[in-house]
Image (spheres, rainbow, N blue to C red):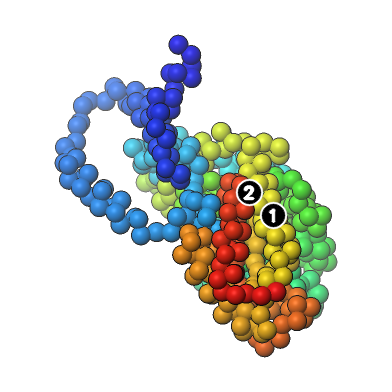
Amino acid sequence: MSSHSKSPVAKRRRRSPPGFEKESLPILAAALDRLIKGFRQLPSNRAAYDFQAIQRVLLEVAERLQDNYPYFHPLYAGQMLKPPHPVARLAYALAMWINPNNHALDGGRASSIMEKEAVAQLARMFGWATHLGHLCSGGTMANLEALWVAGQLKPHQKILASDQAHYTHQRISHVLGLQFQSVPSDCKGRLDVKALKKLLKKRDIGTVVATIGTTSTGSVDPLPELLDLRAQYGFRLHADAAYGGYFGLAGKLGAETQLTYDRLREVDSIVIDPHKHGLQPYGCGCVLFPDPAVGRFYKHDSPYTYFTSTDLHLGEISLECSRPGAAAVALWATQRLLPLSRGGRFAEMLSQSRGAALALYEKLCADKRFLPAFAPELDIVTWIPRAARVSQASQLSRRLFHHAARHHLHLALATLPTRFFDVKASGMKCDRPSVTCLRSVLMKPEHRDWIDRIWQILDQAARTLRIKG
């Protein structure tokens, strides 16, 4: 009998509907059987569960969950929602039979080691052989820790970030009692270096946040220029790469964008969210420092949790206490299957997402009914329908959004500065400083194969709404 015929997957002949694969479930059962073998020496302690009642509740849950957009499907291209890889789902579920807590080694021995290994792989992706870092609930908590360390090193000094940076930086600064100031962005959604220079002359800036992939347009701040300014003014440089951090593995980035990724290893801290492009379930973020010495700021004593080992407990280098070990197991398994290497399958997925964005952008540029913003640096595309006035374009964006949704194409709406669009050249009257635009996040690899279908729905919606070029 061939090894293929022995596979649990091979026994399943009937495929599941798109987006709801069930072929992997026998793999989970087989893995659970192997996990059980490691605990067979324990005395029997069979818990009594009412499985009929559990089934009734779970079927009710399935009914309730139908009230969702189809986030898993390629026709969902709105917000940053990407289904986890099957190996991540399975590994997470498998770990839940133990439910490890990665705060202390007592609560998650194996999963803590797996977290350290997975985080080290992320650090190596950025070019760091030594580092301090850990997983957390997401980008917000990861950025909080990075700015907290920055505040310890640069007390009573301001945090600066672009007006297109994530809103969390301003909120976090207020929570930490640090002053925050927004820096204008340029016409491509990147931090305006000239505006930053003026602010730096006041010599009260402690930390500058470089956004490596804004959540509105996917713009990448000009890191080489920021590094030059750091050498001159001595501020800390934090990279919020929650969204775009993985794209350094992808090929064929724009020249300026590539320069940023080439020098990302030179920053003082990095945040990345594996639950965005890393194929992980929510929530899984990561904060990284190239200097392990910043661990001194985390130092604390917890005699009843750290007593069994002199090895480093992850709770000793994080602000969060209890953290799901299952998240670490899922990330470790995913990176085991899909290594973080240039030219590998994972990198190819990123290239496919970017290719989808470029393909949609080219179609928009070639159609006089639409006015796209600047070319996408990563995999986010923004555009507006052409109209006599910017205010009318905003109204048409909303109508097109709803019309497309009725045909199962789910986009997003975003309010962006009008300067992001060449309104003057299009002949539109600029009667508003901002415009409501359509935004598409093409973060699924299969989006590349669905661009024609997406365009067909957009074209039909534009015809129905009588949008003219």
Q: Residue 351, percent across and down? A: 68, 46
The residue at 58%/54% (across/down) is 453
Q: Quadrant of the N terminus?
A: top left
| Dots 2, 1 in contact, CB < 8 A | yes
Cα–Cα gap, marks 2 and 1: 8 Å
Please say whether residue 367 is visible from this viewpoint: yes
Question: How crowded is the residue under tag 1: few (<14 C-alpha within 10 Å), some, or many (20+)?
Answer: some
Q: Amino acid at mark 1?
A: Ala
Q: Quadrant of residue 201?
A: bottom right
Q: Which residue is mark 2?
A: 448
Q: Amino acid at mark 2?
A: Arg
Say if 454 sits above or below 186 in the image: above
Q: Quadrant of the C terminus?
A: bottom right
Horizontal side of 339 relative to 309 (left or right) equals right
Say if 200 sits above or below 6 in the image: below
Chain-order first, disc 2 or disc 1: 1
Say if 136 sits above or below 197 in the image: above
Please say whether residue 293 is visible from this viewpoint: no
Depth order, front residue of 383/149:
383
